[in-house]
Amino acid sequence: MIIRYISAGDRLNYGDMLFSLIFREYFQDEFQIYYYGIVKSNYTDFGAIPTHSYKSLIKDICPSEDIVVIGGGEVLFPRWNKLYSFIYPMYSIIKNNRYLNVLDKAFNLSNNFFYKSSYEFPFVPNLQCENIYISVGGQFNSDISTEEREYLVKILMQSKVVSVRDIRTSISLKSHGLDTDLVPDSAILMSKVYPYHQLQYKLKNKTLLDLNDDYLFLQVGRFKGPKDINKFIYDINYIAKKKGLVVVCCPIGIAPGHEDHELLQYFCKLDSSWKFIKPNNIFDIMYLIAKSDMYIGTSLHGLITAFSYNKPAISLNKKIQKANSFIETWCSEFYVSTIDYEELSSKVILIEQKWNKSKAQVQLEYCQDKVEKYFQFINNYLKTKNNFH
């Protein structure tokens, strides 16, 4: 048996690169694994696992023998054009321009110029073999037609192993007759796979070892930032001053559509006391969050990293449903639900009161144990199928 593992790890986005690294750690000794993305990629310099293209997946797969593993992330149910916009900067410009987007839809540019496929939803593949979904996220939404819904439900129904990472996804799938296992995002295991005391040896930017311990880690996505930037800077400085911390800005999502660095560098221009750090690999990011006194940001996997290394965190921007749903599902006892920017200063006391390091550690161990038991279940399931073949 060969495992064909597919994820969104073909772009410079911290969270999407974590899934395959965690999976490899737990399954590489038992199975032969090939890694795929939408496109062929090689971000080994950034710490990621290289991916073969989706076109190669179609060509390589042996339907009667292989297993396809969809390895996590918000993969239910993005279309090709959305996924391409995270990979190709020029296509991202088209998608984010109102008029060009109309042309894209009219002439189906993504299909004509990138990859022609009958599968509109690449992470719900109809490849005539078994699919396994690990802690995935997403919802059925209004732009999915009735015919497409029926197709998606049919494919998911054929999968015997489907786990989702939050209540929001579970409810959406259940409303369409799909029963799933509720399992935390597999990235929660990062502190077990990469213990804090070992992270320093994986750093690419060794100057981070000299960084003062007293700082808060700030990350904000380019299209997810505050309307009133000056007030936001004032509020962050209020929190930092109150705690005796400096502000360190570090991008997590660098891919098109994320571009954290653009907004963070602008913040640092407006306030010269803020420090901008460009990460040279994913372990630079992991280490900076793990070492910080607090994480504040819009990234779900920034939040999950803080949780995994037992750090207080503030999740920004209520529009980001996946982050809010993760908190409500797994860690609402000690993290405040996602807040809007204008609420930041008024909720500081509540945020501080709610944080409980010992409670967080107990819940972290529960979540990690739940993911590891699920991995063991998958492992046993795959071995059984392998013996059958």
Image (cartoon, rainbow, N blue to C red):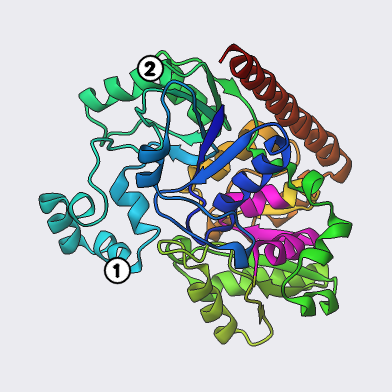
* Mark-to-mark CA distance, 1 and 2: 36 Å
Range of residues picked out in magenta: 281-305
Labels 1 and 2 touching (C-beta < 8 A): no
Where residue 205 appears, as percent x and y from the top left, is 73, 76
Residue nearer the viewer, 156 or 2: 2
Quarter of the image for the C terminus: give it: top right
Compared to residue 262, the image places residue 133 above or below, namely above
Compared to residue 272, the image places residue 203 above or below, namely above
Specify whether 315 is left or right of 306.
Answer: left
Amino acid type shown at disc 2: His
Name the residue located 59 percent from the left edge and 54 percent from the top edge.
Answer: 49
Q: Is residue 332 visible?
A: no
Name the residue located 34 percent from the left edge and 58 percent from the top edge.
Answer: 85
Where residue 331 appears, as percent x and y from the top left, is 70, 37
Quarter of the image for the N terminus: give it: top right
Specify whether 203 is left or right of 120.
Answer: right
Amino acid type shown at disc 1: Met
* CA neighbours of label 1 inside 10 A, class few (<14), some (14 to 19), many (20+): few
Mark 1 or mark 2: whose residue is earlier in sequence: 1
Disc 2: which residue: 176
Element on which disc 1 rests: helix
Disc 1: which residue: 90
Name the residue located 89 percent from the left edge and 41 percent from the top edge.
Answer: 358
Name the residue located 83 percent from the left edge and 65 percent from the top edge.
Answer: 201
Q: Is residue 293 magenta?
A: yes
State whether the magenta stretch is mostly helix, strand or loop.
Answer: helix
